[in-house]
Image: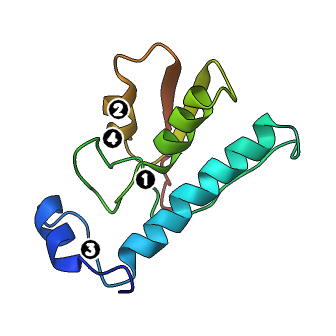
Amino acid sequence: EQGGGAEELAELTGGSVYVCAGSVRAATIAAGSVTEAVRRVCDKSLARAACIVRPPGHHAEPDRAMGFCLFANVAVAARQACSAGWARRVLILDWDVHHGNGTQKIFYRDPSVSRTGMRVRTIAK
């Protein structure tokens, strides 16, 4: 099966996430890419990393996909960094046009991860 489960995912998201047969595979690759980049920065095999991935991830909550996001990519990587001992604390800067509710909810009571958001708006001329 090539990612399947699109009907089940659509039901779980309440219609806020569009899915197809390849959605789970794409989201898994996105989350894994972010986690791998964090691992490589933490082990100093990379000096820095920027991950431009789709789906973005910051709306996915602990128990549901939401707002185009199946998995909370940065949250997965931050959790792995702390649990694997790559980092004791993590700061997440969410830079987007709207609030990353999923990332906030995931780490709301976790002192090892802090998050802050910066809203970026485009002004039409």
Q: Considering only order in the chain, which callout, 2 or 1, is on the residue closer to the N terminus?
A: 1
Residue at which label 3 appears: 18
As helix, strand or loop, the secondary structure at mark 1 comes to loop
Q: Residue at position x 49%, y 26% from top?
A: 115
Residue nearer the viewer, 81 or 100: 81
Residue nearer the viewer, 124 or 71: 71
Cα distance between the residues tagged 1 and 4: 8 Å
Q: Quadrant of residue 91?
A: top right
Q: Considering only order in the chain, which callout, 1 or 3, is on the residue closer to the N terminus?
A: 3
**Mark 2 or 4, closer to the camera:** 2
Please rate how many residues cluster around mark 1, counting C-alpha atoms within 10 Å: few if below 14, some from 14 to 19, many from 20: many
Cα distance between the residues tagged 1 and 2: 12 Å
Q: Position of residue 99 (x, y in %)?
A: 37, 40
Residue at which label 4 appears: 102
Cβ–Cβ under 8 Å for marks 2 and 3 = no
Q: Considering only order in the chain, which callout, 3 or 2, is on the residue closer to the N terminus?
A: 3
Cα distance between the residues tagged 3 and 1: 13 Å
Q: Residue at position x 56%, y 42% from top?
A: 77
Cα distance between the residues tagged 3 and 4: 17 Å
